[in-house]
Image: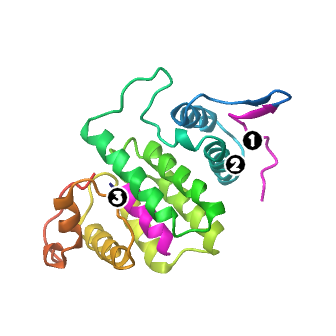
Amino acid sequence: MLASTLLALAVSVSASAAPLPACVTKTKLGFNEPPTLKALMGCQAGKRTGFKGNAEALGDFQRGEVREYLARHPERASTDEAADGTAEDDSKVGKQKRRSREAAAANAERLPEKDRAEFQGLNEELWNMSGDGQLGVTSDMAKTIVGYLTKQQGGVSAEMADLLGSLEKDGAKLSHASMRKLKKAARDAKGEGLDLGIEDPSTEQWMLDPTTDPAPGEKDPSPAVN
C-alpha cells in the first residue's frame, strides 16, 4: 500500500560513463526482449545486482526500457501473468498489487501522455524494491522517488522529503510520527482527486479520517498498513 500511495503523492508534488546493462536489444529482425513485463522487471532486478556504475542513471535507463516496452506491448501492462500463462495471484498481496496498478494507471492520466508509461513502470519498480510491500520504504525506494521527482519537477518539496525520510527511517513498522505525516499527505492527495491505490476500503477510510490520527506522545508503533 505504501508504494502505491507514495506514487499518488508523487503526481502532486548525467549519463554514467559505465555501460548500462540492457534487457532489451534491437536486432535487424526487431527486438530481442523478455516475453512479459514480469520477466522484464526480473531481468532488470538482476542487472541492478552488483552494478558498479551510476545507480541513478541505471534507474532512468531501466524506466525508459519499461516505458518503451509498454508502448510496444500495452496488452502486457501487468506482472501477474507469467510467461507460462499461469493465473493471476489471488492472494492479499496479489490483489493489492492489481489495485495499485489500477491507481497508477488512473493517476497517470493526469500526466502528459509521454510520461504515463514511465510512471506506471515506476509503480512496478517500487513494488519490487519493497519486497511486494513487506519491507516498507527502503533507502533505494526513497532515492528512486527523489530521482523521479527531481527529473519531472526539478526538485522535491520539503514536506515530501520529510515524509520520505521518516518512512525510510521506520522501515516496515511505522512510528506514529510517520503515520501522522502519511495520513495528512494521503488526505491532501485525495483532496486533489488522486487514487491512493488502497485495496481495502476500510483502510482507506481510516487513512483519510483525521480523528484516527495517532496522538502526539501516544505509544508506537502504528498499525501496519502494508
Q: CA distance from mark 3 to mark 2?
A: 26 Å
**Going by the image, does 93 lie left or right of 223?**
right
Disc 3 element: loop
Q: Which residues are magenta?
A: 2-26
The amino acid on which the numbered mark 3 sits, given as a three-letter code, is: Gly
The amino acid on which the numbered mark 2 sits, given as a three-letter code, is: Phe
Find residue 162 and report its image quarter.
Answer: bottom left
**Going by the image, does 163 lie left or right of 45?**
left
Position of residue 181 measured from the top left corner of the image (x, y, whole percent): 31, 73
Mark yes or no: residue 221 visible: no
**Going by the image, does 64 lie left or right of 130?**
right
- The residue at which mark 2 appears reads as 61
Q: Is residue 24 above or below residue 200?
A: above
Tell whether label 2 touches label 3 (CB within 8 Å).
no
Taking the spot 24% from the left edge, 56% from the top edge, the residue there is 225
Taking the spot 79% from the left edge, 40% from the top edge, the residue there is 19
- Crowding around mark 3 (Cα neighbors within 10 Å: few <14, some 14 to 19, many 20+) is many
Tell whether label 2 touches label 1 (CB within 8 Å).
yes
Q: CA distance from mark 1 to mark 3?
A: 32 Å
Q: Is residue 79 above or below residue 199?
A: above
Find residue 5 and report its image quarter.
Answer: bottom left
- The residue at which mark 3 appears reads as 197
Taking the spot 37% from the left edge, 65% from the top edge, the residue there is 195
- The residue at which mark 1 appears reads as 20
The mark that comes first in sequence, 1 or 2, is 1
Q: Is residue 110 above or below residue 71?
A: below
**Front-most of 221 and 13?**
13
Q: Is residue 60 above or below residue 189?
A: above
Position of residue 113 measured from the top left corner of the image (x, y, whole percent): 62, 63
